[in-house]
Image (cartoon, rainbow, N blue to C red):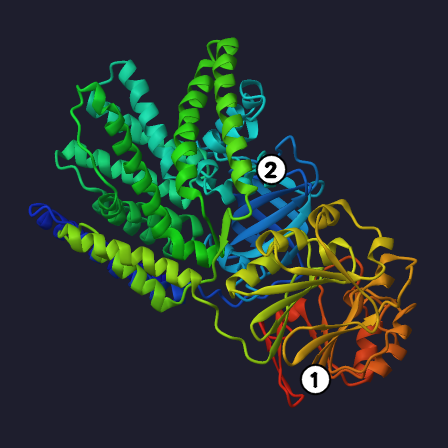
Amino acid sequence: MLALKTHLSVSVFIGLGAIAAALSALLRKRKKRLSVFLLLIAIMLLFSFYTENRSQLPSLFVNKKGNVTGVVSNNPVYQPDKNRTILYLDGVSIDDKPFDYKAYVYVYGNNEGRLYEYGDTLHLPEASLWLPDGRTNPDGFDFRAYLWRKSVALCASSSISKIEIVSEKANLTRGLYRLSAYLSERFDDLFPKNAGVMRALLLGDRSGLSDETYESFQEAGVAHLVALSGLHVSCVAMFFETLLLLFLVPAKPRWIITSGLIFLYTVMTGASASLMRAAMMYALLVIGRLSGDPSDLMTRLSFAFLIQLIINPLTIQDTGMQLSYLSVLSLALMTRPIRSLLPCFKGKRKDIQSIPLVLYNNTADAISSSAAIQLGTLPSMAKLFHSAPVLSVPVNLFVVPLGLLTVYIGASSLILSFASMDAAKLLGHAADFVWTAILFITDWVSGLSFAMLNIRAWSAACVIAYFSLMALASPFITENKRLSKTLTSLTALLAVVVILWPAPVHKGLDIVYLDAGYADSCVILAENDAYIVDCGKDNEITADYLTSIGANVKGIFISHPDIDHAGGIREILKRYPKAEVYVSECWERMDVGELVQSALSHRKLHYLKAGDVVTLSGGASAHVVWPEADFTPKEDNDGSLVLNIVYAEASALFTGDITERVDKYALCDTDILKISHHGSKKATSEAFLSAATPEIAVISVSSNGHGHPTPEVLSRLKDINCDVYRTDECGAITITMHKDGTYNIKTELQAGG
């Protein structure tokens, strides 16, 4: 059935492509492109229905162990910090039986020598097998859907010592990946200060780029510089054309050769959706030049979009593809309307006094282009990243030209290195100098408290209205300049209104136990305000959830400084700097790690002890059960802040990681219990459970080497007839508490699977 749908889809879209070509050719005579734009929207709507069906993964059952054989279908990525290599296997068989889908494989062990290459057939004896996780948190990342877009339906892992290379197959892609690795070895000599950045810029290899550097680029709004995109393809195409021109290659052969080189470059650097889009659009431009009938931007964009969807319909769900197409679409639709809002001065080019006017107009053009992209991608940024860089337009104005300059300098230095390494190093130092300046700018901008704007996801109605206004404001539909200016202003106004519109008032009290892996993180929604009990690890799971719902974060309770409870505090405070931080009274007598300590430096902490009460809302409050005043824990777990959240007749108890040594001092009757220390047998004693008498128990846990939750704890909970919900089985668990003492439970996944 899946194959039948695919064939029907291809036929339908080949037909639509023919219709698009006919309409575009017909309307080109009238110098209009409205049909292509409308067709683009029609394809989007049609594919939204098709991909909804195509996105459904097949029902699979796999053993926990199996002998796996397959062919490496990617350029293996070695992650030295995790001591593992990431592989995609195609043509997979499990225990000598064909498997219809690809596999995503983790190979553990030192692979700095790059033992595996594209095209190698590998045998993984007794590999661990499992199905990839889907979305486990509200509006969270769906790893299963991400892999399924690449036809991957299975995960596997093995050690480097067990894997056998059955055969090796030489092909063009393998050769291009080898070329990339060979070129990469020269970067440390050519660009000693910024080799990692230059690898990302020219080869698409971000493995040498630190998380802090990439984060600063994101917050400054210029992450696209180090994530290969259509902008890079344009620069590389211009570089190749210029190089061929120096060798006196005629125009038509030059275009054809450049087009071929661009596709080879695209494959060598990973063939991402955005790169393929740019490569196809350049090829379509060349076809138009050769035919004497050059196509316009919208026509090339439409056909590239159509071709990519025919090849793989699920590509439409790819983040890079969405942002890539939206960026180009926004350039076509909004650049001229935005430019019309800025003054335009005319001056004679030969007049020296007109030079400032020319500079102004060029700057205004650049601002208009950058603003158009920011406006067009804003709804997607809100949905995908829950934030947007405030200073993106002015930063891009300065940084992008400098960054693109280093593309030419870097490529020239790389080519020159084959003739004279010393001369190439001199040129490389120029690129290093420019990037040092860029990094200074991005670090400074990202350090500003207002650099990033938190944005919750837009409603479907707002998105439709927003893009409708953009379309109407564009020169493709509205030729009246005054009307276009008005519609452009309304588009910007709608964006401001949607961003500033207050989140809906939350009635009652919701407790959301997030799936933070082998960590703890919970969000309490009390009327208009949100409170956090523990922050998970050093990731953005909690912060992303808070931003996606437009939460007004008033306070953060940290049970104790262990990284699986406090590691996410830095990102949360970065987005919500006004939030109050509450810790246990014995916090200063515990081992606070450097990561947490630096995040809390210069912050006022509120120290809580047993008997203290923190009001959360008119009907909800947090009662501190433990620790007692002046308590000094033998280990940090015993100093955990124990909170009982009371809402009318219902209550929920949070226990951090307290052990049975101290839980006898933290006795408290409750309806809902967060099990201590992920279900360790040294916690949640029988005496503690007898006093608590919970009806619901929540265990925050994932696959681990400690055996948590232990059979002992699960048995104790069963003995008191307590219903157990686990984040590794249920995903995020949301409990809505009512004033009459009742509550509702909703899980992100079906319990038990």
Residue 73 shows up from this direction: no
Question: What residue sits right under mark 2 in the picture?
Answer: 210
Question: 148 or 194, which lies in front?
Answer: 194
Q: What element carries label 1?
A: strand
Tell me if mark 1 has few (under 14), some (14-19) or many (20+) residues whose alpha carbon lies within 10 angstroms of its own: some
**In x, y percent, where is residue 117?**
55, 35
In the displayed structure, 527 sits above or below 271; it is below
Question: 196 or 436, which lies in front?
Answer: 436
Q: In which quarter of the image is residue 546?
A: bottom right
N-terminal label among 2 and 1: 2
Left or right of 129, for residue 406? left
In the displayed structure, 603 sits above or below 611; it is above
Tell me if mark 2 has few (under 14), some (14-19) or many (20+) residues whose alpha carbon lies within 10 angstroms of its own: few
| Residue at the extreme bottom of the image, as rendered | 740
Question: What residue sits right under mark 1 in the picture?
Answer: 650
In the displayed structure, 356 sits above or below 515; it is above
**Image point 33% across, 24% down: which residue?**
240
Left or right of 447, for residue 466? left
Q: Is mark 2 on a helix, strand or loop?
A: loop
Name the kind of residue labelled 2 in the image: Ser
**In x, y percent, where is residue 183?**
51, 24
Gap in angstroms between the C-alphas marked 2 and 1:
46 Å
**Image point 26% across, 46% down: which residue?**
338
**In x, y percent, where is residue 388?**
46, 51
